[in-house]
Amino acid sequence: MLHPRIQEVTERVIRRSKDTRAAYLNRMETAKSKTRVRAGLGCGNLAHVMAACSSSEKDLLKQDEQPNLAIINSYNDMLSAHVPYKEYPDLIKQIASKRNATVQVAGGVPAMCDGVTQGRDGMELSLFSRDVIAMSTAISLSHDVFDGVFCLGVCDKIVPGLLIGALSFGHLPIYFLPAGPMPSGIPNKEKARVRQKFAQGLIEREELLEAESASYHSAGTCTFYGTANSNQMLMEIMGLHLPGSSFVNPYTELRDGLTASAVNTMLDHLIDEKPSNCLADIVSEKTIINGLIGLLATGGSTNHAIHIIAMAKAAGINLTWKDMADLSEVVPLMTRIYPNGSADVNHFQAAGGMSLLIRELLDAGYLHRDVKTIVGDSLSDYAKEPRLDVNPNLIASTATGPSKVKWVPCPENSLDEDVLRPATNPFNAQGGLQLLTGNLGHAVIKVSAVAEQHQVVSAPAKIFNSQVGLQQAFANGELETDFIAVIKEQGPKAKGMPELHKLTPIMASQQDKGFKVAIVTDGRMSGASGKVPAAIHLAPEAVEGGLIAKIQEGDLVTLDAPAGVLKVHVSDEELAGRTHEVSEQTMTFGTGRELFEGIRQTVSSADLGASAFGVVYE
């Protein structure tokens, strides 16, 4: 039986989304009913489509009887997570050609890394890149000559952007293909220890760089459970990956086998006319709720408190932070993956991974089982994990293609309950995210990584309008006290909502000295942030009249995560009499920020998805 709270929230979302969801599905049905895309192309149009194709591909495209598949690729060779995608197009084409299908790389999308831009001006483009990726996806598919799509993306804004853009083509089958995490590097506890020692001035830069390089050391996603790996969890629990494919390392036989299986699965639907679920069928209200459950049960990235709202809205589904908070009250926290623990995603995968997590959540009544996926009409298919088929008659040699894959039941029990626990014995009875409300507005906090004794902080405010200001205060020895760092003017309209992860080692070092510390900001923290309580995504933001801009130095502020409270202890009358203290908002130049001024002026607030597309969906 489905948990009553899950049912209640789902029904609430369905009612709230009735009109917008119906409008979206009507658009998709209209698109689906049109003549097969290439059938109506003029000769000049078709000649452009196939100009650079081989003669055999041209013959297939002229006949217009076999599928033509699109690839949207986030490949670049600077960022480790995207490097494996270099080989994917050739592999996909190799598999498709055996079925007389054609494949074209329809376009690329930018993939920037928050790990590179932390604390730098480029971070102000990070959140906006999601909407750019969505538009790039739409441009890539606007040629309207494809029968199915493979989206190749991993990291922070790339997957949400790809999905938002792809949902405008939701009448097509669209699969997401993961690249997998890099093998484990140095232990995460050691990495955090070295970072903190550097922040305290106890070690030199060379030692810090050596530790960081031992952590981020090869192709694949970073192994901590930040936004990138939360993306992969979401795509799998939402049925947009093949079962069990999220956390298989790159350049392995199983990884290539899964990619080949995805191609064959899509072609089974398109060529053999097996029942096929298009993207609009898969991304439903129940699917979005399942994604939220996965996020809460794993203590996933706070960035998804923004992204999942924007992704849902692209499918005509209206989700709120209140929905998230109500679910978090009943969903158990079942994993401890760094920064919520010391293990990384490779340890999680070895302990049982997504298949065991999904089975536990299904059996305990926390997930909707009756949802459509890329492989069928039940999430039960995702309680299985992939294995190479050991039948020598089925395993192809490396000369002829990847090995075939079969799916087997997940382990009966977790192989390491320090990393992954059953729903009946969770790390915490509640989920990893919490909504905070009070006289300052509403914000989000990630509690899964914060020790219980640090989840309530009442302390005087120290006011900053940049993270540089806090860093300078630390260097000057001004933070040797209990305090709540109020970092304003970091919201979407002010600065594009940059992550403030650079502040984590500083704040953690003060916490370790015994001081009660916390952060309140209208900006973001990294998906890897933890340990220090942080009320983030505060809405309304300072430059939109948010009361964060009325907090003064020394005001007593309370952050009470268990109670869901965030407030400044100043009377309503006094607050009403204070002026908003904000810097003059002028166009910002450098690292291309001036090109994003239009988005900065139109972007919605964090609780509405921090999106430039809000009006489009209404």
Image (cartoon, rainbow, N blue to C red):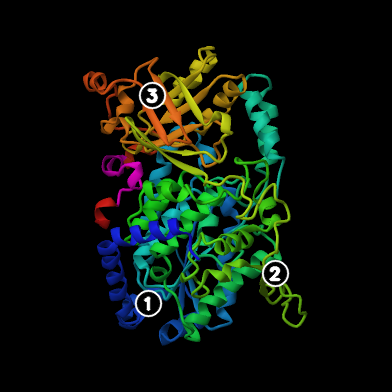
Q: Give coordinates of residue 120: x percent, y percent.
A: 47, 32
Magenta span has 599?
A: yes
| Nearest the eye: 281 or 129 | 281
* Disc ID at residue 553: none
Name the residue type under label 3. Answer: Asn
Give the quadrant of residue 340.
top right
Magenta span has 433?
A: no
Per the rendered image, the range of residues in magenta is 597-613
Element assignment for label 3: loop
Name the residue type under label 1. Answer: Ala
- Count of numbered labels shown in the rendering: 3
Residue to which mark 3 is pinned:
465
Q: Residues within 10 Å of mark 1 (few under 14, many from 20)?
A: some
Q: Which numbered disc flags the more N-terminal residue, 1 or 3?
A: 1
| Nearest the eye: 561 or 4 | 4
Cα–Cα gap, marks 2 and 3: 52 Å
Q: Disc 2 vs disc 3: Cβ atoms closer than 8 Å? A: no
Q: Is residue 30 above or below residue 108?
A: below
* Disc ID at residue 47: 1
Question: In front of the other: label 1 or label 2?
Answer: 2
